[in-house]
Structure formats: C-alpha cells, structure tokens
Image (cartoon, rainbow, N blue to C red):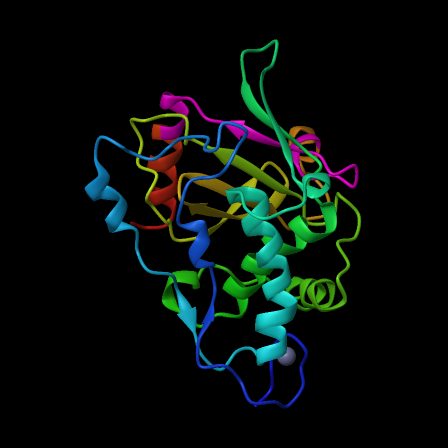
Amino acid sequence: MICKLCLEDKPLLRRSHIIPDFMYQDIYDENHWIHRGRPSEPSRMGRVPTGEYEGNILCKPCDNEIIGNYESYGSRALYGGELPIAESPIFEQVVTPAGQRITVCRNIDYRKFKLFLLSILWRASISDRDFFSDVNLGGHEDTIREMLLGGYAREPNIYPILLATYLGDIETPADVIGQPHRFRLERSIGYNFLIGGTYYIFFISRSGIPAYVLDASISPSNEMKIIHLSGDDSGRLLHQYFGMSGK
Ligand SMILES: [Zn+2]
C-alpha cells in the first residue's frame, strides 16, 4: 500500500492521528497555562473527545519519525516540557495601543513549528473521515507533502498561520474541537481549525492575505503572536464557527 507522505509502497499503520492527542489541552505560557482550564469544574475536563485517527494512510517511519518529530517539538513548545533552556520559547503578554491583548512568542523554531501545524492541515486533507470533509487542499496537498517530507518551511508568506485564543476567557468552553472548515476572507482562502480553545487559521492563497496575519504568523526570526479574543469576540466567533460548519 502506498504511504501518502513518502509515496512508497510499504506496510501502513492501522492508526494515525489526524489531530494529535496532546492538543486537547490548554496552551502553555510563562505562567504555565494561558488559562488553567476549569478548576471549579474538574468534571468537565473529562469530556474532551478522543482524537480523530485513521488507518492505512502513513507508513511507520513517516508517522513516527517525520511527523513524530514535528509533533514532539510542537507539544513541547505549546504545552511545555523537556526542551533545553536555549530552545525553550519565551512568552510575553502584551496589550497593544489599540487595547488588543496578544502573547508574543519568541525563540519558537520557525521550521519545526510551522511544519508541525501544516502537518495537521495536511493530514486533515488526506483524511477520508467525515469530520475533515471540508478540508480539501487540491494541488496544495502535494506542495505541503513535499514541505513535510523534505523539512522545508519555505517563506513566511507561503501558508501563514494565525493563532487566536479565547483561553483567557472563562465564559467560553475550552474543551471543544470544532469541525474544520474552509473560509474566504477578503481575497484570501483558508481553513479554520478550533482545537481546545484556540483557532488555528491557515491561509492557502498566495495573495490577499491581510497584513495583520503576516505580522502575527510565525516568522524566520522565530517569533509569533497569539491573538487573545475578548468575551464578545469569542462568543461571536464560536457562533460563526459552528454556524459555518453546519452544526
Ligand atoms: Zn511513508
């Protein structure tokens, strides 16, 4: 059987995750968590759905080593863990003059982190599961496959990714995985994933990407900005998100 990443005829794994299990938790920051979940409602934390996985898509080296290495970095960068001090991301909470709260992330590895996020988008596109039926990258699927296989993160304006979180807002649920959907924003097209209280917004078009997206997306200087959504924003976005995905 043909592995969808290396395109070689190899035995394929019976279980490959599309969204890694470790993303079903809150993101790490300098205070350990951007938001600690719901200590007042510990029972809710048990309701996190199990990860979506699929068989016969990837061979063992592609899943465990190539994608596994990106996941290993993504997990330690976003959720904390065993990274040497020199490789640990630095997070700083900032309020812009316009009143927008952001988390500035520094020392976050451009290549590894971007490819980690793109691996989720790509896996959703190759997946046949209903949950990912709206994700269809067309010709971009093979472009991203080559980036993942070769370890090329390419230029920052190629598939930039915006992270926006409502984890600072206790009124909105953090234990939600939304069905990914395609969107059109001005002249750009992309896909929006809602995972554990954070929107991962992938831009596919090469043109028409808003300047603030390029400013916030991870850059080769190893910096990234996570946008914090206010209570009003997050309620509206959640409503739109599930409205658009037909739920
Ligand atoms: Zn393979």
Residue under the point 74% across and 38% down: 222
Extent of the magenta region: 215-234
Determine if the magenta segment contains residue 125.
no
Measured as percent of width and height from the top left, residue 10 is found at 61, 89
Task: Please say if 98 is above or below 207.
Answer: above
Task: Give the camera-side residue of 189 and 58.
Answer: 58
Q: Where is residue 47 drawn, in percent x and y? A: 24, 50
Whether residue 138 appears in this view of the structure is no
Q: Nearer the viewer, residue 149 or 183?
A: 149
Residue 185 visible to an observer of this rendering: yes
Q: Position of residue 121 (x, y in %)?
A: 56, 57
Q: Is residue 8 above or below residue 92?
A: below
Instruction: From the viewer's side, name the closer residue of 8 and 34.
Output: 34
Which residue is at 40% across, 45% downward? Answer: 25
Magenta stretch holds residue 231: yes
Q: Residue at x 29, y 26 (%)?
A: 171
Quadrant hosting residue 139: bottom right
Q: Quadrant of residue 105?
A: top right
Q: Residue 78, relative to residue 148: is it above or below?
A: above
